[in-house]
Image (tube, coloured by chain):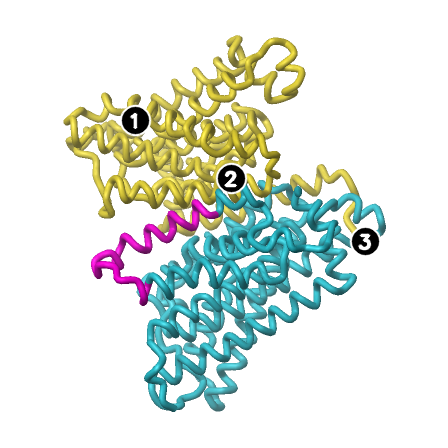
């Protein structure tokens, strides 16, 4: 192991796994602020990729032009699922566990319904091959550099939005005490829709980056879901900043282990084991009662 | 034996119904009673299937096929049970998010290992060489006998679940599911009981996986997709999460409809069966899960229950 290995792992980890950070930010907004574990978030990502591919191939727009529209469309779908399913569920006082199963059902439903719309074969973005730029001696495609840049910009913007702006204050107030927030004149519906919309945009753009990097397939989001969820559960305790840091470290770790083991599956396996053990260790430290 | 009256599709359709009913029954113990949301059903199913298959085909057995078969079967069940013990220990004191991560992560890990460990599992190409522990003539007769044997195993699981409902142990499980801190404060060993229940259920799923592998005669990572977990969950939820017969009713209704009625008896165009019907099946499964949990959380059998405690647990 030398400096070359580290710079490789750093560059590949940052560029290849930048969408992971973006998706994790979106997922953690929902998870932290509405308390919902939304398995169907993986389909928000997948739909972002499909919308981007569709705009790109039907209207001959280039990738930079479709990125934001794809995110906005995924955001609208995300808001749609809130009104169609999660809002009625909340009104009916459905339990947490049932909500997870409902979102799981929605995930399956969307994943297969989109195949009726977009067809069964794997689809591709129609883009010219990206230029390669050498960073620290490692060749990186321009789309991936753009992904890193936009993740950085979006992460900062969201951080500012949640922590500093008055909307962010409303969002945080609603998350911590709904009744009190309502009594202080915050419109819960507007704020909740805002959260779902922003989360959907982040997921959709992450999906477009995933899609342009390889191919667009129905399982695109689901393959990433476990890792996004791991990042959010492990890093989410320290807020949005924790999610971003954990996401970046996870990306670098995955790249380093993939280089080391020569196979991405082993890197994923090691990551799953490490994170689950970490969760267990943390729960042991914070256990409120003695186990019998 | 003359089996002309029996359609080959009917055997495979009934077999998938029976397998999913078995998984649903075990999931009922974990999800319905103890409220552990096991999203890794296919992981335990798969680890049992592969442990059985690898031991049976890769070892040079010195004695007859039947003994080798039974030992491998026990081994598959045991490995799944040990995995259940480990995963149960990891997730027993975590929240819903931890349980989801742990079980989903386990299923993914099993899939990864089935793909990467090519020397043992054959990787993505798959593992062949499995066979029935008997030979009574035609393929159809062999498959029919296997269907009968697996049905008996699932019936035994049904009896076991029914027994649990009537014992103090079952009431303890329900209490853990309803209010774990309360059960703990009454001096019940909630942590230990949860782990053991999870391990026993997972061992059963491993056994069913091994039995399923014998019928398929060929193991590949493709059969370790999330659709197995989904089917078991749909069968259980539509029938009734809290009821003994829930998984049985739901399994025959939902899986039976798609794998028997649609597959063999509906006059549908042939080209639909390739992609449109399987796709539609998943859409219906997802939709059913949403609809039932929104509008009738206790499933079809829900209201007939006499036990007031369970009704309160499930929010009605």
Tell me the residue at 39%/77% (across/down). B130
**Chain of the residue that carries numbered disc 3 in the rendered image:** B
Residue at the image point whose x is 25% and y is 59% from the top: B268
| Mark 3: secondary structure | loop
- Chain depicted in cyan: B
Q: Marks 2 and 3: CB-CB under 8 Å?
A: no
In this figure, which residue is indicated by the disc labeled 2? A230
Q: Secondary structure at mark 2?
A: helix
x and y percent of residue B164 in the render?
70, 64
Verify CB contact (< 8 Å) between mark 1 and mark 2.
Answer: no
Residue A275 visible here:
no
What's the colour of chain A in the image? yellow
Report how far apart the C-alphas of labels 1 and 2 lie in the structure: 25 Å
| Image quadrant in which the N terminus of chain A is located | top left
Select label 2 or label 3 by which is in front.
3
Alpha carbons under labels 3 and 1: distance apart? 53 Å
Q: Is residue A249 above or below residue B114?
A: above
Tell me where residue A70 sits by quadrant: top left
Asked if both marks, 1 and 2, belong to the same chain, the answer given is yes
User: For the image shown, how many numbered marks are present on the structure?
Assistant: 3
Q: Residue at x 56, y 36 (%)?
A: A234
Q: Which residue is mark 1?
A: A70
Q: Position of residue B250 (x, y in %)?
A: 51, 58
Residue matched to label 3? B188
Which residue is found at the position 34% from the left and 37% from the top? A46
The answer to if A117 sits in the magenta stretch is no
For the residues labelled 2 and 3, the Cα–Cα distance comes to: 32 Å
Q: Is residue B201 above or below residue B241?
A: below
Task: Give the mark, 1 or 2, whose residue is nearer the N terminus.
Answer: 1
Q: Position of residue A90 (x, y in %)?
A: 57, 31
Badge 2 density bin: few <14, some 14–19, many ≥20, Cα 10 Å: many
Q: Which region shows up in magenta?
A: B263-288
């Amino acid at each position: 192991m030398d400096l070359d290995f580290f710079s490789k792992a750093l560059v590949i980890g940052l560029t290849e796994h930048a969408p992971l950070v973006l998706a994790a930010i979106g997922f953690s907004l929902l998870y932290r602020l509405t308390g919902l574990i939304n398995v169907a978030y993986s389909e928000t990502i997948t739909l972002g990729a499909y919308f981007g591919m569709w705009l790109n191939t039907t209207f001959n727009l280039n990738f930079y032009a479709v990125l934001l529209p794809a995110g906005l469309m995924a955001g609208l779908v995300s808001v749609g699922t809130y009104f169609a399913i999660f809002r009625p569920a909340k009104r009916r006082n459905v339990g947490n566990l049932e909500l997870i199963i409902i979102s799981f059902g929605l995930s399956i439903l969307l994943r297969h319904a989109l195949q009726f719309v977009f067809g069964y074969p794997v689809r591709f973005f129609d883009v010219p091959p990206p230029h390669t730029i050498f960073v620290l001696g490692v060749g990186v495609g321009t789309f991936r550099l753009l992904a890193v840049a936009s993740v950085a910009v979006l992460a900062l913007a969201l951080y500012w939005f949640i922590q500093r702006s008055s909307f962010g204050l409303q969002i945080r107030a609603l998350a911590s005490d709904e009744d009190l927030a309502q009594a202080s004149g915050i419109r819960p519906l507007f704020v909740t829709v805002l959260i779902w919309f922003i989360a959907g945009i982040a997921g959709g753009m992450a999906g477009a980056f995933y899609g342009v990097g390889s191919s667009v397939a129905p399982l695109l989001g689901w393959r990433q879901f476990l890792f996004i969820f791991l990042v959010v559960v492990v890093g989410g305790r320290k807020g949005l900043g924790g999610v971003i840091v954990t996401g970046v470290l996870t990306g670098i770790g995955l790249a380093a282990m993939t280089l080391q083991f020569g196979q991405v599956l082993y890197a994923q396996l090691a990551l799953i084991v490490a994170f689950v053990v970490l969760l267990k260790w943390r729960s042991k430290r914070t256990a409120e009662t003695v186990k019998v | 034996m003359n089996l002309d009256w029996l359609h080959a599709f009917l055997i495979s359709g009934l077999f998938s119904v029976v397998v999913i009913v078995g998984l649903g029954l075990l999931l009922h113990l974990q999800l319905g009673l103890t409220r552990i949301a096991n999203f890794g059903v296919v992981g335990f199913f798969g680890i049992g299937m592969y442990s059985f298959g690898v031991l049976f085909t890769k070892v040079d057995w010195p004695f007859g096929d039947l003994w080798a078969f039974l030992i491998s079967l026990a081994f598959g069940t045991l490995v799944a049970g040990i995995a259940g013990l480990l995963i149960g220990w990891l997730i027993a004191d975590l929240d819903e998010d931890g349980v989801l991560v742990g079980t989903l992560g386990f299923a993914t890990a099993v899939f990864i290992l089935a793909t990467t460990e090519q020397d043992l599992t054959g990787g993505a190409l798959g593992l062949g060489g499995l066979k029935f522990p008997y030979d009574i003539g035609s393929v159809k007769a062999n498959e029919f006998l296997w269907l009968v044997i697996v049905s008996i195993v699932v019936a035994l699981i049904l009896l076991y679940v029914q027994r649990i409902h009537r014992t103090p142990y079952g009431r303890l499980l329900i209490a853990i599911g309803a209010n774990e801190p309360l059960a703990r404060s009454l001096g019940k060993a909630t942590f230990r009981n949860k782990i053991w229940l999870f391990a026993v259920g997972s061992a059963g799923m491993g056994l069913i996986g091994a039995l399923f592998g014998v019928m398929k005669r060929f193991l590949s990572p493709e059969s370790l997709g999330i659709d197995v977990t989904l089917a078991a969950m749909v069968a259980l939820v539509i029938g009734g999460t809290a009821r003994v017969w829930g998984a049985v009713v739901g399994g025959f209704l939902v899986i039976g409809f798609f794998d028997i009625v649609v597959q063999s008896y509906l006059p549908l165009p042939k080209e639909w069966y390739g992609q449109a019907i399987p796709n539609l099946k998943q859409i219906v499964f997802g939709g059913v899960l949403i609809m039932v949990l929104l509008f009738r959380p206790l499933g079809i059998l829900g209201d007939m229950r006499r036990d007031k405690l369970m009704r309160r647990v499930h929010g009605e």
